[in-house]
Image: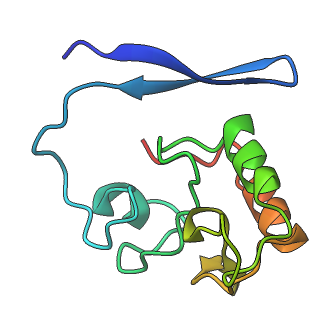
């Protein structure tokens, strides 16, 4: 399968790449969080929890682009324009359901997951 690579972010002198390509019927992702069941079962993630794989860029990689995405929404609450659950999580040992506030805990969570990938 040929993969097309595209630049998704250039920030702080760091270039992040995301593999892209045509969608295909692939491995099962029961919870729909972008991380396959097989991968979640061999990592710290739960294949039945849709909130545990905190991946704001939706590319399966935890890189600088994810940190930047969370930082861009820092301070936004669920009752304000611009809020999205993509950059918000609560914490219960692992990322959990959004708490309605993008704050330092969200930034720290995405930094902690740096290079913990699901591809």
* Residue 15 sits above or below residue 99 on the image: above
> What residue is drawn where x is 57% and y is 84%?
97
Residue 12 in which image quadrant: top right
* Residue 3 sits above or below residue 32 on the image: above
Check the picture and name the quadrant holding the N terminus: top left
> What residue is drawn where x is 70% and y is 48%?
69
With 73 as the anchor, is 58 left or right in this view? left
* Residue 69 sits above or below residue 45 on the image: above
Horizontal and vertical percent position of residue 22:
20, 28
Residue 86 in which image quadrant: bottom right
With 46 as the anchor, is 15 left or right in this view? right
The residue lying toward the viewer, choosing from 44 and 73, is 73
> What residue is drawn where x is 82% and y is 53%?
71
Check the picture and name the quadrant holding the C terminus: top left
Horizontal and vertical percent position of residue 99:
68, 87
With 33 as the anchor, is 97 left or right in this view? right
> What residue is drawn where x is 23% and y is 12%?
2
Q: Residue furthest front?
A: 81
Horizontal and vertical percent position of residue 68:
77, 43
In this picture the colour scheme is rainbow
The residue lying toward the viewer, choosing from 31 and 99, is 99
Q: How many marks?
A: 0
Horizontal and vertical percent position of residue 73:
76, 59
Q: Residue furthest left?
A: 25
* Residue 28 sits above or below residue 90 on the image: above
């Amino acid at each position: 399968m040929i993969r097309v690579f595209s630049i998704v972010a250039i920030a702080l002198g760091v270039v992040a790449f995301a593999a892209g390509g045509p969608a295909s019927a692939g491995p099962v992702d029961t919870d729909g969080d972008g991380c396959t069941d097989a991968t979640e079962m061999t990592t710290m993630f739960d294949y039945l929890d849709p909130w545990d794989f905190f991946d704001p860029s939706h590319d399966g990689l935890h890189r600088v682009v994810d940190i930047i995405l969370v930082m861009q929404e820092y301070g936004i609450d669920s009752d304000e324009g611009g809020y999205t659950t993509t950059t918000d999580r609560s914490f219960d040992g692992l990322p959990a359901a959004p708490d309605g506030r993008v704050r330092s805990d969200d930034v720290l969570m995405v930094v902690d997951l740096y290079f913990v990938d699901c591809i």
